[in-house]
Image: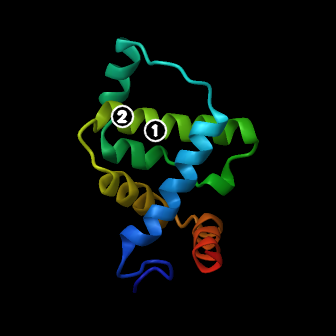
Amino acid sequence: MRHPFVKRNKVRHAASVLSTITMFYLCASPLYALTETQKSELAAISDEKFNSGFQCPESIGSHGDKVRAVEYFMDWVGARHPDWTLDHVLNFRYLLLVRHDCMVTLQNIQNDKENH
């Protein structure tokens, strides 16, 4: 059975996800550079391990913790997959939301898509 939010055009939905994440990250996070040690540690985290530790945005309590979760995602992608295209990042994030049944976030994406 298909997940209710999985559509044929995943990239279109994922674009909304990434644009929201990117704007949130750029507006809410301090600009800083990771040390080489931090990059190495993040690069060592496999996709499967990252997936197993992923939390739905709606399950994260405070605004500050949500900011840190987005920063962590963006930092991990940059360290683990520096060659990923925008489509890769969009699809992976969307897949995480679907795999973890992040229904509130997925509904917000759907609502945003319908309103724009």
**Residue pushed farthest front?**
116
Image quadrant occupied by the N terminus:
bottom left
Type of amino acid at the residue the image marks with label 1: Met
Q: Position of residue 53 (x, y in %)?
A: 48, 44
Asked whether 50 or 69 is in front, the reply is: 69
Question: Circle 2 — which element?
Answer: helix
Residue 25 falls in which quadrant of the image? top right
Note whether 40 is above or below 103 in the view shown. Answer: above
Is residue 114 visible from the viewing direction of this image? yes
- Check whether the beta carbons of the residues at disc 1 and disc 2 lie within 8 A of each other: yes
**Residue pushed farthest left?**
83
Note whether 42 is above or below 65 in the view shown. Answer: above
- State the residue position of label 1: 74
Asked whether 97 or 26 is in front, the reply is: 26
For image coordinates 28% across by 39% down, the residue present is: 81
Q: Position of residue 106 (x, y in %)?
A: 57, 69
For image coordinates 37% across by 55% down, the residue present is: 92
Is residue 22 found left or right of 86 in the rendered image? right
Image quadrant occupied by the C terminus:
bottom right
Q: Residues within 10 Å of mark 1 (few under 14, many from 20)?
A: some
Type of amino acid at the residue the image marks with label 2: Gly
**Residue pushed farthest right?**
62
Asked whether 116 or 78 is in front, the reply is: 116
- State the residue position of label 2: 78
Asked whether 58 or 109 is in front, the reply is: 109
For image coordinates 57% across by 54% down, the residue present is: 20
